[in-house]
Image: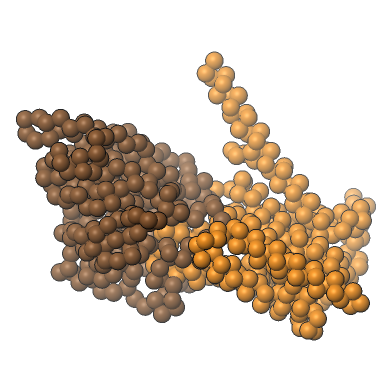
Amino acid sequence: MERPRGTMYTHSPRVVESTNSMAQLLSRPPRHDTLAPPIELEGVTLRFNQGFALKDIAFSLPAGQLVAVVGPNGAGKTTLFRIIAGTLRPDSGSVHVYGHGPGGHVCIAYVPQRSQVDWSFPVTVTEVVMMGRIRKLGFFRWPSRRDWAFVRQALDRVGMLDLGDRQIGELSGGQQQRVFLAQALAQEAEVVLLDEPLTGLDLPSQEAIFTTLNDLKEDGVTIMVATHDLNLAADRFDLVMLLNRRLIAFGTPDEVYTRSHLFEAYGGSVHVISGEDGAVVLADTCCEGEEEHQRHE
Amino acid sequence: MSEILGWLAQPFGYAFMVRGLWASMIVGIVCPILGTYVVLRGMAFLGDALAHIILPGVVIAFLLGWPLAAGALIIGVLAALAIGAISKRAEIKEDAAIGIVFAGAFALGVALISLQRSYAIDLAHILFGDLLGVSISDLWLMAGLGALVLLTIFAFYKEFLVLSFDPILATTLRLPVTFLQNLLLVLLAVVIVISIQAVGVALVLAMLVTPASAAYLLTRRLPYMMLSAAGIGAFSSLIGLYLSYYANVASGPAIVLAETAIFLLVFLIAPGRGVMWSRLRKRREDTMVS
């Protein structure tokens, strides 16, 4: 299911769900059930050709957690995020975000892989961040002074205030990623899904992103990050979700990184060396970003 | 000096040239502004297809004695929906679906015209425009529809921006994506209808794509891209009219040739993105390395 950018005009009926009717267009997003978990999946299954892209995924996340989603290429990380964001509909199972289906929420921010963004598009950093606010603005209304102040504040929080007038292609990889974090801030997102945000970034850029993520976490935002880096996932995240079409394990890094779990996810392609205090993971043989949806088409 | 002014003013001593100027200005401004979305969303093939699909609509409207614009609009909107429906059956890829509808409808249009030899319907005028035959009532219709298109673009500016930049973001922001996509298609059909008189269905693609692509190379923000595309379109229309008057070139092709020339110029020398610019930069980098 490739994004339609730069390709033919696409009607992609399966991607765009539930937001199309005029009734929905005029209705307000449902009020959050604050007692319900931010993200709750039950038996989520998506078929793909003869097999499964995702099979029987079930989990529930408490608010304010920083969760790493790891697994080999084609494990379904992007697909999972797109289902939670409500841009793909599973064949069966249910998705609840704060007690409601994802379709009506404006509080979910999905940050795509950098390779999926058209960086030569004629927009500035500030304009991209403002995009996060347009549903709040509503139709036929232009951003007010308050909205611009909000956007500036979001840029300030990710340390990009002085780059607001740049065209988005004129930024480094880490800065590009932070633009989208600022967009999520401007959107006042309560669930943030980041697809491979750390791939290809140097350490200072990764640090800058973690600073913002921890900042968001303090505010009670629930964050899921897809990554290939098993060590980073263990070091910097509260919870780790090990995925390979099925949910193999979910919990603290210690609970998840056992020999049998990792073997189940990666087969022989991950080297595990047992240290004194549990497993030490050496490497996932995986490579750069391109996720499973290439093959989805 | 006054000679040059006289030379410039002379064509517009004729009423049909003045009407042609107005018509070409409307098309030269409205098409490129909508064209920025066509270029940014990669809808060029669809735009061309829609233009050709409209042919049978024009012919049928003519045979039934309806206003041509009405027939064209109905067919244009129907075709857009048909393409959507065919490509929803995932067995057929979307560009193939567009191709099927496009070629089939165009053949139907030409067939209908060939059956009606005795009628005074001129295929060449529909294909390549008849700018100098524009009547006052045509002009009012073009101005009204053109203003409607610009107003709609203005009203949905931020939604179209998000949809063009990132359709997935548009979905997670719960924008009415299908509604906006269809609205863009309807705008495209309207713009093609008002362009038939000026450049014809075979060349309207150039009005949509060429000035907007030149503007894309020159600017880094969408509002400026729209403004410069409109500027290039309007200027090309003027040049095209002079070419038509003094060199006796058919006016539609003359306008398109002017646009193409401007694009090539921009493509060569645009600061930052042009061919010569990147050559220069490459050479500078090479010398710095060595």
Farthest residue in the top direction? B290
Can I make out residue A142 in this image?
Answer: no
Q: State whether residue A81 is above or below residue A158.
A: below
The colour assigned to chain A within the rendered structure: brown
Can I make out residue A245 in this image?
Answer: yes
Farthest residue in the front direction? A50
The front one of B237 and B61 is B61
The front one of B76 and A128 is B76
Q: Which residue lies at the image location 59% right of the left edge and 71% below the top edge?
A: B82
Coordinates of residue A56 in the picture (x, y in percent)? 24, 59
Coordinates of residue A253 in the picture (x, y in percent)? 14, 43
Quarter of the image with the N terminus of chain A is bottom left
Residue B110 location, quadrant:
bottom right
Specify the chain shown as orange: B
For the image, the number of numbered tags is 0
Q: Which residue lies at the image location 66% right of the left edge and 48% below the top edge?
A: B214
Q: State whether residue B14 is above or below residue B6.
A: below
Residue A184 location, quadrant:
bottom left
The front one of B52 and A49 is A49
Q: State whether residue A144 is above or below residue A217.
A: below
Q: Which residue lies at the image location 6% right of the left edge and 30% below the top edge?
A: A276
Q: Is residue A31 left or right of residue A172?
A: left
